[in-house]
Image (tube, coloured by chain):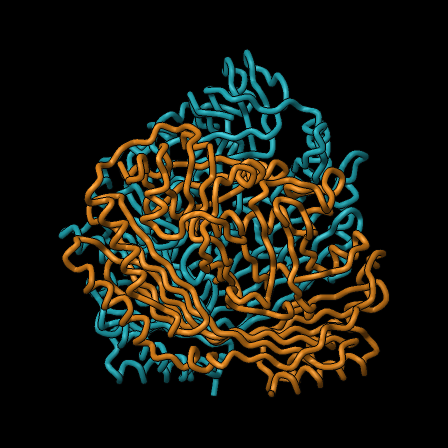
């Protein structure tokens, strides 16, 4: 593999310069089709490749990155030259430690990567065209995305024996139907590693069920108050994702800037309900995008982060932050395979509805989540794409979007049940380089007394 | 072959293959350098260099786009973009057309005196380490100073004959401190570099202490007081919003809802829509009479000024809201034409020049330029405070969560001051407020005079799929709103 040879040569180059250093390569081959107003609004293909270089000399550190491909070895070497030239003027970082070696692994290549790269640009268009056709009589307008592609990362350092290499593939589909002339929207989404995992029929079914509720129940205002809430998988994924970043990041714990603080909390503290367990497990059968090593080149092993409500583990990924606190890195928060373990609750939509006798809101999706107070784990977001009021085992109204203002402590201490069945929710990043991500979690979770507030 | 000739050949090739329109953007230079300190030592430092090419093709009423990190790939990219446009044309309910624009052959250069990349790295590092020292106080948990510098050289060509070269320079800076309150909970105070709208953009921005370094000791002093301040209580009261928070308020509840692509439903599946409809222009009372808002892309010095947008349209100053009445939107050639077609009349006579892409590998979208609130005549900050009976003053966002159609919002801030009988009574921690967008802007009761107006900058505005992070500006005065839900 050309990139492995390239990284081996760059490692030798670093050694010949008498510096220690680490080089990571990331590349992507991405396709994205976007639809809005029943029309394709964007059909795009992107090739990207970048080298991230860190040089260390004693207590000095220099970081640089450059867009280049493996054949542009001289270009990368010239960037290394300039880093080596500049490192002398950097101030000492007194807590900086030396580079440890990386884990060892054979190159890992998804057999579907090539298929995803060479996919016809008609595939995404056809998904939307058939969906438009399917709902043609419903007076709705389709929006959404079809995203697919491959992503690579490779890493070597001057103390590692040979480069690590990972190439993965992924797709994500999101379909949103807006009822024309109203503010009402419904949504379905899927994520996977290869296209045969995609079931359009299933997504259409989800849309149908929700559309039917909007068509057959009356619209009502919901008076803000604490109420029991069933969160669907996408809403729950947003909550768990925040929980991982705000609560289970070792760096946040050390800096005391998140919801757990080293001066107040310790491993073994019972902080959440008995029925809440979160693991990170790249070998788990149910997870998508299994990554046995992170972008930082560290081995990732199955870890119980929260075990029956007890804090059991934290994720330390960043070397400089860990050096500051005398900690060792143990994982990579960018490459997690998190699972919120299931419970004994209903796993399909009908059973879930039937199980709710007292007034319960169903929230499928949380829009624009943010944290007014990180220390207390407080978060807020508005419901979107279907908010239903359930009572006596049936949906009685579809209601306007509501604002949730809760804390991660309160929420995970008030879980009434979690579904028995696990599903994957998409958390892939489109901010920078392509990196597939998914959280595995119960289809639904019911939480008691969730504060719903005005705006 | 020179890259210009290569691009011209590719565009000609596309015309021969029957495209209606195509453009190419080459990022010849795209550099970023960041330096950050924490507690007296260097915490982060990075340099990034990118380059690449993107081609956008309009074929039978549909867009196709492709990009590559190698500008030598321009032919491959052009052909891939055409292939993508051909398949997109199979599902096209609103065939795309573009409002006409003048052909432009021109250059644009950000006004800049000291190229931040020409300043020796050691000087820049010691500048931020020195600021770090100025923030340091007994009782702070963490503190630091950081800055980033951007330099881009962009080449734009299209099949209509426009040829534009842009040299863009931006800088941004940040000062921060964290301390724990009596309950051991973390609190933050920070300051973001703002710009002098009449000055220049280079390293010299950092050298004006009024914009940046003056605030280093201020944030730590304020934070230490804040750490023992009481919690902000729930109340309905007058709210005086200072500049940095006013920038966010303007950004989220005027800027985003007035992006024409959002209004027309093109961001529905991700960022959301807008509560504004095409029928609202020239009639909707968006805010109080005192509210006049411009999308001013020709402010001399701001990251929201760029000469020409990525449709090749000249930047301009567009009045969005005039004495409270909605007049215009953030527009591109495509969306303005579509809005006119949908209405069956001309609402937008031309593109407002706000179509921008974050890089060569993204397509242009309606993006904010400088969404500015015109200063009023209610005097200085002290004048406004002196006339308040009871209320809250606050600044600097901690959290923002906005309804998907931008119809409502919930914001939390770093710092608040209770005001009673025309004077600041005390500082309060963790202030938050919320509201419905239109009633909120209609409750605007005082707009600070020009002396309170500042050119705030935003470096992290996210929009679109794949996501694009954009830089822009908000020139805003301090403003007073009545009967706001606080707490
Ligand atoms: Zn924004």
Residue B243 position, x and y percent, is 53, 35
Residue B418 position, x and y percent, is 57, 20
**Viewer-side residue, A337 vs A379:** A337
**Viewer-side residue, A403 vs A59:** A403
Q: Quadrant of the C terminus of chain A?
A: top left
From the viewer's perspective, tell me whether residue B167 is left or right of residue B331.
right
Q: Which chain is cyan?
A: B
Q: Quadrant of residue A99?
A: bottom right
Q: Residue at 65% x, 81% y: name it.
A: A106
Q: Residue at 63% x, 49% y: name it.
A: A306
Is residue A103 depicted above or below B172 in this figure? below
Q: Quadrant of the N terminus of chain A?
A: bottom right
Q: Which chain is orange?
A: A
Q: Residue furthest top?
A: B421
Q: Residue at 79% x, 34% y: name it.
A: B139
Q: Residue furthest front?
A: A344
Q: Quadrant of residue B31?
A: bottom right
**Viewer-side residue, B350 vs B427:** B427
**Viewer-side residue, B100 vs B64:** B64
Q: Residue at 32% x, 38% y: name it.
A: A390
How many numbered callouts?
Answer: 0
From the viewer's perspective, tell me whether residue A127 is left or right of residue B229.
left
Residue A280 position, x and y percent, is 60, 59
Residue A88 position, x and y percent, is 82, 67
């Amino acid at each position: 593999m050309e990139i492995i040879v390239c990284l081996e040569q760059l490692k030798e180059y670093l050694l010949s310069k008498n510096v220690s250093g680490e080089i990571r390569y990331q590349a992507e081959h991405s396709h994205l089709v976007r639809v809005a107003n029943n029309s394709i609004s964007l059909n795009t293909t992107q090739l990207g490749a970048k080298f991230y270089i860190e040089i260390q000399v004693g207590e000095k550190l220099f970081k640089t990155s450059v867009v280049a491909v493996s054949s542009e070895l001289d270009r990368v070497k010239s960037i290394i030259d300039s880093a080596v030239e500049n490192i002398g003027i950097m101030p000492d970082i007194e807590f900086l430690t030396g580079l440890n070696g990386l884990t060892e692994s054979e190159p890992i290549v998804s057999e579907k990567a090539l298929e995803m790269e060479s996919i016809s640009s008609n595939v995404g268009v056809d998904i939307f065209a058939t969906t438009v056709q399917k709902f043609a009589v419903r007076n709705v307008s389709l929006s959404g995305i079809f995203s697919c592609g491959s992503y690579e990362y490779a890493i070597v350092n001057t103390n590692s024996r040979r480069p690590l290499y990972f190439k993965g593939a992924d797709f994500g589909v999101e379909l949103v139907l807006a009822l024309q002339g109203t503010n009402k929207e419904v949504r379905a989404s899927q994520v996977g590693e290869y296209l045969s995992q995609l079931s359009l029929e299933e997504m259409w079914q989800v849309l149908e069920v929700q559309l039917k509720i909007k068509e057959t129940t009356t619209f009502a205002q919901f008076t803000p108050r604490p109420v029991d809430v069933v969160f669907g998988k996408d809403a729950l994924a947003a909550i768990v994702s925040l929980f991982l970043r705000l609560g289970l990041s070792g760096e946040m714990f050390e800096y005391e800037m998140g919801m757990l603080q080293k001066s107040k909390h310790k491993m073994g503290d019972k902080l959440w309900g008995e029925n809440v367990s979160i693991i990170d497990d790249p070998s788990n059968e149910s997870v998508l995008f299994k990554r046995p090593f992170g972008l930082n080149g560290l081995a990732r092993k199955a870890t119980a982060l929260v075990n029956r409500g007890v804090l059991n583990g934290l994720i330390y990924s960043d070397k400089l932050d860990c050096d500051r606190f005398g900690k060792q890195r143990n994982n990579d928060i960018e490459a997690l395979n998190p699972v919120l373990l299931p419970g004994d609750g209903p796993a399909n939509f009908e059973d879930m509805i039937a199980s709710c006798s007292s007034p319960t809101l169903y929230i499928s999706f949380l829009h624009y989540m943010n944290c007014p107070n990180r220390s207390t784990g407080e978060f807020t977001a508005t419901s979107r794409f279907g908010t239903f009021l359930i009572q006596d085992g049936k949906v009685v109204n579809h209601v306007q979007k509501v604002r949730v203002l809760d804390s991660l402590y309160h929420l995970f201490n008030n879980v009434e049940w979690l579904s028995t069945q696990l599903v994957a929710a998409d958390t892939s990043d489109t901010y920078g380089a392509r990196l597939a991500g998914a959280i595995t979690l119960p289809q639904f979770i019911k939480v008691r007394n969730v504060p719903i507030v005005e705006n | 072959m020179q890259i210009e000739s290569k691009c011209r050949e590719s565009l000609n090739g596309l015309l021969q293959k029957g495209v209606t329109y195509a453009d190419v953007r080459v990022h010849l230079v795209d550099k970023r350098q960041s330096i950050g300190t924490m507690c007296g030592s260097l915490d982060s430092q990075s340099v990034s260099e990118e380059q690449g090419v993107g081609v956008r093709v309009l074929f039978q009423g549909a867009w196709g786009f492709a990009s590559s990190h190698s500008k030598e790939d321009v032919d491959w990219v052009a052909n891939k973009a055409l292939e993508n446009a051909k398949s997109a044309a199979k599902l096209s309910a609103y065939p795309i057309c573009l409002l006409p624009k003048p052909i432009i052959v021109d250059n644009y250069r950000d006004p800049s005196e000291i190229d931040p990349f020409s300043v020796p790295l050691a000087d820049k590092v010691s500048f931020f380490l020195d600021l770090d020292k100025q923030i340091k106080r007994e009782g702070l948990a963490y503190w630091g100073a950081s800055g980033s510098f951007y330099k881009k050289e962009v080449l734009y060509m299209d099949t209509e004959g426009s040829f534009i070269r842009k040299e863009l320079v931006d800088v941004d800076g940040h000062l921060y401190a964290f301390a724990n309150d009596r309950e051991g909970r973390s609190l933050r105070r920070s300051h973001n570099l703002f710009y002098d709208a009449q000055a220049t953009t280079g390293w010299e921005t950092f050298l004006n202490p009024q914009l940046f370094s003056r605030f280093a000791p201020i944030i730590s002093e304020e934070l230490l007081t804040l750490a023992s301040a009481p919690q902000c209580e729930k109340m309905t009261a007058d709210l005086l919003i200072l500049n940095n928070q006013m920038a966010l308020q303007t950004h989220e509840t005027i800027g985003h809802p007035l992006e024409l692509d959002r209004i027309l439903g093109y961001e529905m599946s991700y960022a959301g829509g807008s509560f504004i409809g095409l029928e609202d222009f020239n009639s909707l009372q968006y805010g109080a009479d005192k509210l006049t808002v411009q999308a001013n892309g020709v402010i001399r010095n701001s990251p929201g000024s760029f000469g020409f947008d990525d449709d090749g349209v000249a930047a301009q100053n567009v009045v969005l809201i005039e004495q409270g009445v909605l007049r215009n939107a953030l527009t591109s050639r495509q969306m303005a034409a579509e809005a006119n077609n949908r209405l069956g009349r001309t609402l937008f006579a031309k593109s407002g020049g706000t179509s921008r892409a974050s890089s060569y590998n993204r397509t242009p979208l309606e993006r904010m330029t400088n969404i500015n609130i015109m200063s009023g005549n209610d005097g200085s900050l002290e004048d406004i405070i002196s006339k308040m009976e009871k209320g809250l003053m606050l600044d600097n966002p901690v959290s923002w969560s906005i309804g998907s159609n931008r119809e409502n919002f919930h914001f939390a801030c770093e710092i608040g001051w209770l005001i009673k009988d025309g004077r600041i009574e005390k500082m309060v921690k963790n202030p938050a407020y919320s509201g419905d967008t239109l009633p909120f802007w209609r409750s605007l009761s005082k707009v600070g005079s020009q002396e309170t107006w500042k050119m705030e900058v935003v470096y992290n505005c996210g929009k679109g799929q794949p996501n694009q992070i954009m830089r822009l500006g908000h020139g805003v005065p301090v403003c007073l709103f009545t009967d706001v839900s606080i707490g």
